[in-house]
Structure formats: structure tokens, C-alpha cells
Image: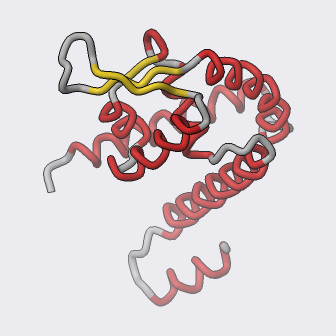
């Protein structure tokens, strides 16, 4: 990867090669993590988007939220969220009902089966996370968290910047 970026940088003056290398490394890490999570979840007949949506709902106040909030948190389009929610509904992991405050709004809520599944799966996920972070000292772990939060903040600022 580094040699390829260096070759392109030689041909394109001013190319921020170090930034491109870091960006590429982040993509590789993200893809690797997602592939590992997908493979692990497949054994539980759950897709990564379904798992993430269920976790977001589980971690919401009262284990409930509006679908539009989930779309925003998961950065998904409403069509994709509808497909994911339909799959979770079909498995009995969430329910959908009108809001008590505004009957035009829909509320999604984790069912007892959905909560049990999350409580079962989360502890099983810990060894995978630990394996991914093996070899990092506590100080490196904290520093990585600080640096990744800065990156998240920069991405959020880009999203909110005028075009």
C-alpha cells in the first residue's frame, strides 16, 4: 500500500501522501472489523446492520426510539432502516407502535427476546474486541481513543460545513 501511494505521490505534486496512507489504513481497519463482526454474527442469524440497530435501540432511553433517530445515529437511509427494522420485527426482537405523544409518529422498542439476545451476544463479543486490541498498552489504548474522537469531530465538522 505504501509503495503504491508513494508512486502516485511522485506523479501528482502536492498530494498529501501521509494523509492518504492514514485514510487507507482506516478503511482497511474498518473493513476488517466489519468482516470479523459479520462472520461472528452470521452464526446467530443476524446481520451487522441489524445488530447495530438493535444495540442502538437497546442503549436508548427506555430501549425505544423513533426510526428517524436510528437513521441519523446509524447514518442509514430510511429505506435501509425500514428493511432492517422489518427483519428485526419478523424475528420478534423489536416492536413498532404509534407514539403516545403523537399518534403520527412511530416508536420502535426492544422486546424481551431482543434484550435477551443482546445480553447473550455482548459478552461473547468481548474476546473478539480484546483480540483486535491485543498488543496495545493502556496508554496507547487511551491515545487511540483520543485520536479517533478527534477524527470523528473533524468528520462531524465536515458534515456540518456549508457546501
Quadrant of the rendered structure where residue 152 is? top left
In the picture, measured across the screen, residue 66 lies left or right of residue 87, that is: left
In the picture, measured across the screen, residue 51 lies left or right of residue 100, that is: right
22 or 60, nearer to the observer: 60
> Where does residue 115 sit, x and y in percent of width and height?
63, 18
State the residue at coordinates (47%, 25%): 95
Give the vertical position of 81 relative to 126 (above or below).
below
State the residue at coordinates (76%, 40%): 44
What colour scheme does the image use? secondary structure
In the picture, measured across the screen, residue 121 lies left or right of residue 30, that is: right
Q: How many marks?
A: 0
24 or 72, nearer to the observer: 72
Instruction: Please identify the quadrant where the C terminus is shown.
Output: bottom left
Give the vertical position of 63 relative to 7 (above or below).
above
Quadrant of the rendered structure where residue 16 is? bottom left
Residue farthest bottom in this picture: 11
140 or 91, nearer to the observer: 91
State the residue at coordinates (27%, 47%): 159
Residue farthest left in this picture: 162
> Where does residue 78 sit, x and y in percent of width and height?
33, 47
> Where does residue 111 sit, x and y in percent of width and height?
56, 19
Instruction: Please identify the quadrant where the N terminus is shown.
Output: bottom right
> Where does residue 33 sit, x and y in percent of width and height?
69, 49
State the residue at coordinates (43%, 40%): 74
3 or 65, nearer to the observer: 65
Give the vertical position of 99 relative to 8 (above or below).
above
Amino acid at each position: 500500500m505504501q509503495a503504491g501511494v508513494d508512486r502516485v505521490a511522485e506523479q501528482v505534486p502536492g498530494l498529501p501522501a501521509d494523509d492518504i496512507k492514514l485514510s487507507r489504513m482506516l478503511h482497511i481497519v474498518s473493513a476488517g472489523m466489519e468482516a470479523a463482526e459479520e462472520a461472528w454474527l452470521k452464526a446467530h442469524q443476524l446481520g451487522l446492520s441489524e445488530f447495530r440497530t438493535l444495540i442502538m435501540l437497546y442503549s436508548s432511553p427506555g430501549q425505544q426510539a423513533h426510526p428517524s433517530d436510528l437513521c441519523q445515529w446509524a447514518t442509514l437511509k430510511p429505506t435501509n432502516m425500514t428493511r432492517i427494522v422489518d427483519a428485526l420485527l419478523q424475528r420478534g426482537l423489536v416492536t413498532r407502535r404509534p407514539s403516545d405523544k403523537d399518534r403520527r409518529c412511530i416508536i420502535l422498542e426492544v422486546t424481551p427476546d431482543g434484550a435477551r439476545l443482546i445480553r447473550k451476544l455482548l459478552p461473547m463479543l468481548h474476546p473478539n474486541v480484546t483480540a483486535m486490541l491485543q498488543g496495545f498498552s493502556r496508554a496507547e489504548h487511551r491515545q487511540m481513543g483520543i485520536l479517533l474522537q478527534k477524527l470523528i469531530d473533524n468528520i462531524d465538522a465536515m458534515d456540518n460545513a456549508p457546501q
